[in-house]
Image (cartoon, grey):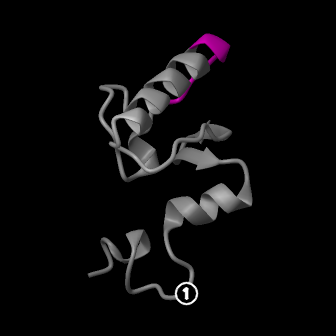
Amino acid sequence: MAPDHQWQEHLQGAQVAGDQLAEEALDRLGKASFARNEVLDVDLIDVEVTSAGIRPIRLRERIRAAGPTNRLDHGKQAVGSQ
């Protein structure tokens, strides 16, 4: 979910919640989108904001953000390499 409340495919455009109230607001938005069948699933994930951008803390979420791991010529990691 981006700051403009539009869904994104890429993590770098995501809204980062800075406190529990912001987390709860994002969770409500996600659940409402799920109820309207706009998304398949919604989970808040722990991230850190670095000079390079938003980075998931857990390895599982880093892999999911990068795309499929079986081949580098499709998925999110292929964008920009073409």
Q: Is residue 79 above or below residue 3?
A: below
Magenta stretch: dominant SS?
loop
Q: Quadrant of the N terminus?
A: top left
Q: Residue at x 61, y 11 (%)?
A: 21
Q: In the image, is residue 48 part of the stretch drawn in magenta?
A: no
Q: Residue at x 50, y 47 (%)?
A: 41
Q: Is residue 44 left or right of residue 8?
A: right
Q: Is residue 26 above or below residue 22?
A: below
Dot 1 falls on a residue whose secondary structure is: loop
How far across and down, in percent of the image, does residue 48 sit?
65, 39
Location of mark 1 (residue):
70
How far across and down, in percent of the image, does residue 53 sit?
51, 44
Q: Is residue 54 left or right of residue 45?
A: left
Q: In the image, is residue 20 part of the stretch drawn in magenta?
A: yes
Q: Residue at x 43, y 38 (%)?
A: 34
How far across and down, in percent of the image, does residue 81 sit?
32, 79
Q: How many marks?
A: 1
Residue 1 visible in the snapshot: no
Stretch of the chain drawn in magenta? 16-21
In the image shown, does 13 or 49 lie closer to the viewer?
Answer: 13
Residue 35 visible in the snapshot: yes
**Residue at the top extreme?**
21
Q: Residue at x 73, y 53 (%)?
A: 58
Q: Quadrant of the C terminus?
A: bottom left
Q: Is residue 76 left or right of residue 59?
A: left
Residue type (three-letter) at the residue carrying disc 1 = Asn
Residue 15 sits in quarter: top left
Q: Residues within 10 Å of mark 1 (few under 14, many from 20)?
A: few
